[in-house]
Image (cartoon, grey):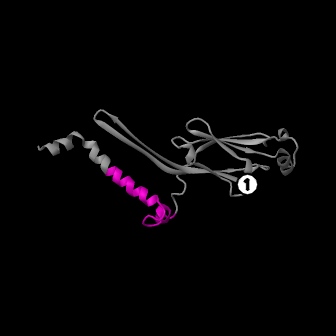
Amino acid sequence: MDAEAGARAAQPGRDMAALFDGFFDSIESLRQPGAGGGGVDAAIGGISASMWAPRVERQESDSALRLVAHLPGVAHDQVRVDTSTPGRLRILGECCAHAVHDSGPDRVRERRLGQFEKDIPLPPGARVADITVAPHGPDSVVITVPKDASRAARATGASDFSTFESGS
C-alpha cells in the first residue's frame, strides 16, 4: 500500500464529505434565481415554496395580538413579516445552518436548509403599520400587532369580548 492510499484509508469520511459538499453546492446553485434555469421553483413547478411552517403561539387581548414564532436554527435577521395581503400576516424566511463537528477520527457535517412560511389571520382593528418584531431568546421572535379596541368591538358588534361563549 503506497503512502497516498494509506492517507485515504486513514480518513475515509473526508472523501465522502467532499462528495457531499459538491452535491449540496450544486443543489444550492439551483436555488439561486437566474443561475442556469430559473431556480428550483421553475425546475420543479413551485413545490419548494414552503417546506415547513414554524410553531406559533397566539395570545390575543383587547389591545394587541402577540405572536411568538419558534424558529430553531434561524437567525433573527432571516425572519421577515409581510402584511401586503389585507387581513393576513405572513411570517417567512429561510434557514441556512451549517455545522461541522470533529471528534477524534470522526467528522460530522450537518446542514439544515429550507424556506419557512406561516400565514396568520389578523383580528379586526389590527394596526399593521405599528407591528413590532423583536428577538425572544435564541430561537424565537415576538411579533406584536396593536389593535384599535373600539374598532374591533364595532367590527364584531360587541362592546365586551368576555360575553362570547363557545358553542357546545
Vertical placement of 107 versus 27: above or below?
above
Closest to the observer, 149 or 167: 149
- Label 1 packing within 10 angstroms: few (<14), some (14-19), many (20+): some
Q: Is residue 121 above or below residue 99?
A: below
Quarter of the figure that contains the C terminus: top right
Q: Return the x and y of residue 105 as percentages of the image width and height.
A: 28, 35
Write the residue at 79% across / 41% down: 63
Q: Is residue 76 magenta?
A: no
Residue 66 relative to residue 167: left or right: left
- Magenta residues span 19-45
Residue 148: give x, y in percent of width and height.
Answer: 81, 46
The answer to whether residue 140 of the structure is visible from this angle is yes
- Res 117 seen here: no
Q: Is residue 43 magenta?
A: yes
Residue drawn at x 82%, y 48% as measured from the top left:
152
Q: Secondary structure at mark 1?
A: loop
Q: Residue at x 37, y 42 (%)?
A: 109
Amino acid carrying label 1: it is: Gly
Q: Main secondary structure of the magenta part?
A: helix
Work out whether 88 lies above or below 103.
Answer: below
Residue at the far bottom in the pictured view: 37
Q: Residue at x 58, y 35 (%)?
A: 137
Query: If the image is split into quadrants, where does the N terminus sit?
Result: top left
* Residue 97, position as x, y percentages in the image: 46, 45
State which quadrant residue 50 falls in.
bottom right
Tell me how many marks there are.
1
Query: Could you say which quadrant of the image residue 12 lies in?
Result: top left
Q: Position of residue 71 (x, y in %)?
A: 56, 42
Q: Which residue is mark 1?
A: 87
